[in-house]
Image (cartoon, rainbow, N blue to C red):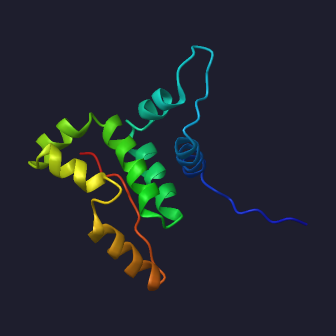
């Protein structure tokens, strides 16, 4: 008898999205929409985006998370929109989400991992 771990549909969808994004593969639909276009469209939904980011965090590789975060930022309007919302420069934000740009996030993740914990992303409640 094989026992399989049950995974919530959003989490499974997000995990597959992270894997496919990292492979940089494209999936064509009937309308010939690229996988990246489909992904960005789906990540506009905060629930989908949080599931996607959590799936990226599961492996513990911050570089995977940062790549996923870049996709979510693109879906949410891009760096310029985020810079305006956060009152930070675009340059600062580009550095933050770059592979080498956020040593604090990497250190915090390593500390949490050593203590048997991990980051988790949840959408804010909408009022």
Count of residue discs? 0
Q: Quadrant of residue 81?
A: top left
Q: Which residue is drawn at 41% across and 49% down?
A: 67
Residue 36: % across, % down: 48, 31
Q: Which residue is drawn at 29% across and 68% down?
A: 103
Residue 53 falls left or right of residue 15: left
Residue 89: % across, % down: 11, 46
Question: Which residue ends up furthest to the top in the rendered image?
Answer: 31
- The correct choice, above or below, for 62 with respect to 125 in the image is below
Question: Which residue ends up furthest to the front in the rendered image?
Answer: 100
Residue 30: % across, % down: 63, 15
Residue 42 falls left or right of residue 124: right
Residue 99: % across, % down: 36, 56
Q: Residue at x 45, y 78 (%)?
A: 113
Residue 110 falls left or right of residue 27: left
Q: Which residue is drawn at 42% across and 33% down?
A: 40
Asked whether the viewer can see residue 124, the reply is no
Asked whether the viewer can see residue 100, the reply is yes
The quadrant in which the C terminus is found is top left
């Amino acid at each position: 008898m094989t026992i399989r771990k049950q995974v919530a549909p959003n989490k499974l969808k997000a995990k597959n999205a992270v894997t496919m994004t990292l492979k940089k593969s494209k999936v064509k639909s009937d309308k010939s929409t690229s996988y990246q276009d489909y992904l960005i469209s789906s990540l506009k939904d905060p629930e989908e985006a949080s599931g996607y980011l959590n799936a990226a965090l599961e492996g513990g590789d911050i570089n995977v998370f940062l790549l996923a975060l870049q996709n979510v930022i693109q879906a949410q309007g891009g760096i310029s929109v985020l810079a305006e919302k956060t009152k930070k420069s675009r340059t600062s934000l580009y550095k933050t989400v770059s592979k080498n740009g956020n040593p604090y996030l990497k250190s915090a993740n390593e500390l949490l991992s050593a203590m048997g914990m991990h980051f988790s992303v949840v959408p804010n409640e909408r009022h």
